């Protein structure tokens, strides 16, 4: 994807985004939270792993704070996504409205496209 930036002169300047600057997912897209169980503290609740949700919005790219906490990040930025997961998909027997969702921001490395989920 090329981004067109205005400059003083006869035409736009083409810029190729760096790794991680282009979002992998878009609002409205169905995603699945990966089921991983790494050692240490990670910011995805266990009860959400393996669940599907819909991307509500993108969040400004940020450094992967999980990797940063272990000293393994060299400043690489990726996106967080606010996803909506139906409460009835999280808790069996949920008696509330089918419109009730949990909204949470999940880092890009924890998500994959959901196919027929």
Image (cartoon, rainbow, N blue to C red):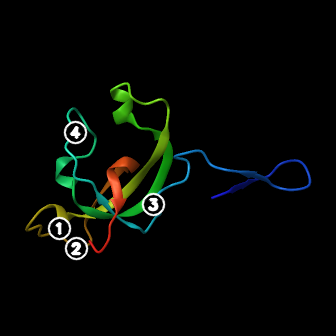
The reply to whether the C-beta atoms of the residues labelled 4 and 2 are less than 8 Å apart is no
Return the disc, 4 or 1, that comes first in the chain's sequence. Answer: 4
Question: Residue, x 33% and y 26% (percent of image)?
Answer: 70
Q: Secondary structure at mark 1?
A: helix
Question: Residue, x 41% and y 67% (percent of image)?
Answer: 29
Question: Residue, x 9% and y 65% (percent of image)?
Answer: 92
Quick one: label 2, few (<14), some, or many (20+) residues within 10 Å? few
Can you identify the residue that label 3 sits on? Answer: 25
Can you identify the residue that label 2 sits on? Answer: 98
Return the disc, 2 or 1, that comes first in the chain's sequence. Answer: 1
Q: Is residue 45 left or right of residue 93?
A: right
Q: Secondary structure at mark 4?
A: loop
Q: Measure the alpha-carbon separation of dots 4 and 1.
A: 27 Å
The reply to whether the C-beta atoms of the residues labelled 2 and 1 are less than 8 Å apart is yes
Q: Is residue 14 above or below residue 53?
A: above
Can you identify the residue that label 4 sits on? Answer: 38
């Amino acid at each position: 994807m090329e981004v067109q930036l205005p400059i003083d002169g006869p035409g736009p300047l083409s810029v190729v985004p760096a790794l991680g600057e282009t979002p992998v997912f878009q609002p409205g897209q169905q995603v699945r939270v990966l089921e991983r169980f790494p050692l240490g503290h990670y910011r995805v609740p266990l009860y959400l792993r393996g669940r599907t949700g819909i991307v509500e919005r993108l969040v400004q790219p940020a450094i992967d704070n999980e990797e940063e906490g272990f000293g393994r990040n060299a400043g690489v930025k990726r996106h967080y996504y606010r996803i909506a997961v139906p409460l009835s998909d999280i808790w069996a027997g949920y008696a509330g409205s089918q419109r009730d969702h949990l909204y949470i921001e999940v880092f890009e490395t924890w998500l994959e496209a959901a196919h027929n989920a």
